[in-house]
Amino acid sequence: MEFIAHRGASYFEPENTLKAVKRALEMGADRVEVDVRLSKDKELVVIHDPTVDRTTDGTGQVEDMTLQELKKLNAGKGERIPTLQEIIEAIKDAKLVIEMKIPGIEKKVLETIHENRLENVMITSFYHGSLRKVKMLDDNIRTGVIFSCQPLKPERLALDASADAIFPKHKFVDQNMIKRVHKHDILVYPWTIDKPKTAKKLIRLGVDGIVTNKLLGARKAHLL
């Protein structure tokens, strides 16, 4: 059972910041998940939304701002928007989940992974075509398809993308889905579970891990 810290310890610290990532590891996260997109000058930056409006004191599209401009913004508690490289350096050998928020950055993400000789990494995305491209470039990288609907054949989403895992919205996960997917040796990581009762239910159903903002509550549910 793996507990994945969604955007770091995002319930306790500003999401997708170095502080959130470090706090997640201190709290015992098995994996830390961060979101990646491109700045105007083609730097991989860690931020969820296409704009900086919600998570910083600035306004505007991420893709229209240079890294230098993004770094001037306050992402909460004095934190700055980190680059993927900065996140990697902060977590060292910890397991990382990188969600690609946009297509077209597959090669750049892989180059960063290879340059840092990362081994414990998984790449996820709603863009399943991007995951196919990742596998074409490096078949050894573990990938996971994210979806927020209720597909008739969830295993097909993973198989068609040559993915190693599925990341379904938790309300669509049932024992039938888990059994179908596990038959193909595909892992199941539902998102985003913040209620201990829901976490406990999914753990008992046999998921391989859960994505959560509230790490301590999820771990507590596992022990009950």
Image (cartoon, helix red, strand yellow):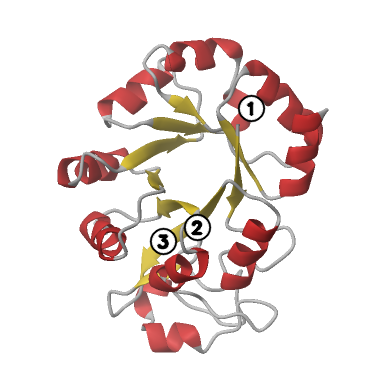
**Mark nearer the viewer, 1 or 3:** 3
Q: Nearer the viewer, residue 160 or 12?
A: 12
Q: Position of residue 213 (x, y in %)?
A: 68, 50
Q: Residue at x 26, y 26 (%)?
A: 160
Residue 213 appears in the rendering: yes
Residue 110 - label? none
Residue 9 appears in the rendering: no
Q: Residue at x 36, y 31 (%)?
A: 164
Does residue 8 sit above or below 4 in this rendering?
A: below
Question: Residue tagged by mark 2?
Answer: 34
Total numbered labels: 3
**Mark nearer the viewer, 2 or 1:** 2
Quadrant of the image occupied by residue 151: top left
Three-letter code for the amino acid on which mark 3 is drawn: Val
Q: Position of residue 53 (x, y in %)?
A: 57, 73
Q: Earlier in the sequence, mark 1 or mark 3?
A: 3
Q: Which residue reaches farthest left?
A: 136
Question: Residue tagged by mark 1?
Answer: 171
Does residue 143 sit above or below 95 in this rendering?
A: above
Cα gap from disc 3 to disc 2, whole angstroms: 7 Å
Other-residue count near label 2 (Cα within 10 Å), few / some / many at <14 / 14–19 / ≥20: many
Q: Nearer the viewer, residue 119 or 97?
A: 119
Quadrant of the image occupied by residue 204: top right
Q: Position of residue 32 (x, y in %)?
A: 54, 53
Residue 36 - label? 3
Which quadrant, please, contains the C terminus? top right
Is 171 left, or right, of 183 in this rendering? right
Other-residue count near label 3 (Cα within 10 Å), few / some / many at <14 / 14–19 / ≥20: many
Q: Residue at x 24, y 45 (%)?
A: 134
Three-letter code for the amino acid on which mark 2 is drawn: Val
